[in-house]
Image (cartoon, grey):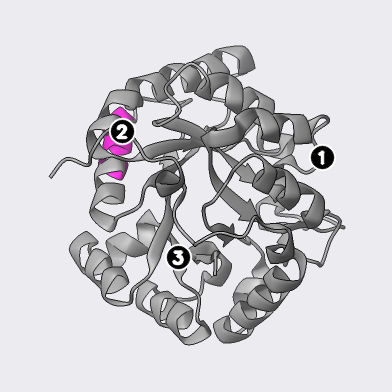
Amino acid sequence: MRLSLNQRTTANWTLPEAVAGCVAAGIEAIGLWREPVADVGLETAARMVRDAGLRVSSLCRGGFFTSGDNHADNVAALDEAAALGADVLVLVPGGLADRDIDGARQRVSDAVAALVEPARDRGVRLAIEPMHPIFAADRGVISTLAQAVDIAEAHPSDVVGVVVDTFHIWWEPGVLDQIARAGERILAYQVSDWITPLPADTLLSRGMIGDGHIDFARLTRAVAAAGYLGDVEVEIFNADVWAAPGEEVVATMARRYAELVEPHLTPCAPRSAAQATPPRHTRAG
């Protein structure tokens, strides 16, 4: 099974509860977030996930490059990813510190370049996540998959790639061509739905798979055709989903994934994105 539970989908669960929930549901992978990992301690979290036999599909999150110097924090995130056995660190670009959106995008590009060698040294790949334009001001000045691939292509494909997140890129003109262009640089595939009307807090507007407008068959077939062999994370930010019992959310998530996503994936042995394209470097330590 290539289904992975991103921790934000069951935000009311602690890390031990999320690990136990995955095991109980037969889910073999988990997408970790730095904050709940810190709550239990890095070594404890790594041991917990390892003892449960779970793959770590990604670690969220690094990035936020556009205001201030957070290089040290991003290097710390790479260290955490390596300790957790996560081959992928998701990078959220960051929003506007002023009105200079072109300058902000250049700062993202420069900051990613500065992380290439630290990432290579640790055997972790950098996954740039383009975000829907509604978040350009506060979270993500990289708004299209095309823009993310433009940045990634300046660096070796075994170190820098992109996240394909259905919520963020489903609307993008020519997105199928951009998915094909990304190819081996697709390091994470995340799924959630676009629901309307949007809630007042648009950050919490991601719906359960199948509850909204996204054609998951179309996008999943494109990701599979591009050669992606990694896990598929369900990542949902939604107050109603978070308020529901975690076991019910996971059961619905797994059923919808099996109906709407899995049939369109390339059959293969489940493995991480980094294993799908073996890196030319080794993890330090």
State which quadrant residue 20 falls in: bottom left
Alpha carbon separation for disc pair 2 and 3:
21 Å
Tag 2: residue type? Ala
Q: As rendered, which of 1 and 122 lies closer to the eye?
A: 1
Query: Is residue 73 located in the magenta-colored stretch of the structure?
Result: yes
Which type of secondary structure does the marked residue at label 2 adopt? helix
- At mark 3, the secondary structure is strand
Residue 202: in magenta span: no
Q: Residue at x 46, y 46 (%)?
A: 276
Looking at the image, can residue 155 be seen?
A: yes
**Where in the figure is residue 53, as x and y percent of width and height?**
33, 73
Q: Position of residue 165 (x, y in %)?
A: 64, 47
Q: Which amino acid type is shown beneath numbered disc 1?
A: Trp
- Residue furthest front in the image: 268
Crowdedness near tag 3: few (<14), some (14–19) or many (≥20) residues, C-alpha within 10 Å: many
Question: On residue 171, which mark appears?
Answer: 1
Q: Which residue is mark 2?
A: 119
- Which labelled disc corresponds to residue 110? none
Relative image position of residue 12 (x, y in whole percent): 50, 75
Which residue is located at x 65 percent, y 52 percent? 203
Query: Residue at position x 28%, y 39% from top?
Result: 123
- Classified by dominant secondary structure, the portion drawn in magenta counts as helix
Where does label 3 land, which residue?
30
Residue 143 visible from this viewpoint: no
Residue 29 percent location from the top left of the image:
45, 66
- Residues in magenta? 71-77
The N terminus, quarter of image: bottom right
10 Å crowding of disc 1: few (<14), some (14-19), many (20+): few
Sequence-wise, the earlier of marks 1 and 2 is: 2
Between the residue at mark 1 and the residue at mark 2, the CA separation in whole angstroms equals 31 Å
Q: Earlier in the sequence, mark 1 or mark 3?
A: 3
